[in-house]
Amino acid sequence: MITEPKELERLPQDASMKKVRFTAEVDHIKDRFKKRMHGQLPPPVEKMIQKQVESFQDLKADLVLNTSEETPEVMVEKLLQL
């Protein structure tokens, strides 16, 4: 699992490697964090989330899975078909 796009450079460039990008609507991500932070999302955390989402937005992947829109079952099926 890669949490920063620059970490991709550290991976070997293997043609058989598949890249899967998990994403979600930014508002859903913020809501998830807000629940973990007892209902309060400090502005620096909100900015960090926005920046993180944007940093991965244009990242090329063999498969993109949106956890805001797809069920776990559908995502598993897509992964198995990859």
Image: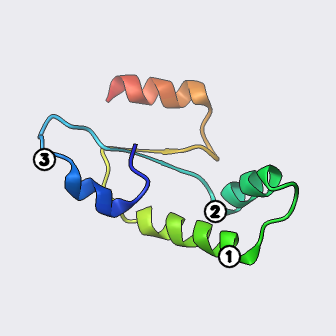
In the image, residue 74 sits, relative to residue 55, either above or below, namely above
Residue that label 1 marks: 44
Circle 3 packing at 10 Å, graded few (<14), some (14-19), many (20+), is few
Q: Which residue was labeled with disc 3? A: 13
Give me the disc on residue 36: none
Q: What residue is drawn where x is 12% and y is 41%?
A: 14
Left or right relative to 16: residue 7: right
Mark 3 vs 2, N-terminal side:
3
> Which mark is in front, 1 or 2?
1
Q: Is residue 52 above or below residue 12?
A: below
Mark-to-mark CA distance, 3 and 2: 30 Å
Looking at the image, how many numbered discs can be counted on the residues? Answer: 3
In this image, 71 relative to 33: left or right? left
Q: Residue at x 68, y 76 (%)?
A: 44
Within-10-Å neighbours for mark 2: few <14, some 14–19, many 20+:
some
Query: To which residue does mark 2 refer?
Result: 26
Q: In what element is the residue under mark 3? A: loop
Quadrant where the C terminus sits is top left
Give the quarter of the image for residue 7.
bottom left
Secondary structure beneath label 2: helix
Residue 8 in picture, x, y percent from top left = 27, 55
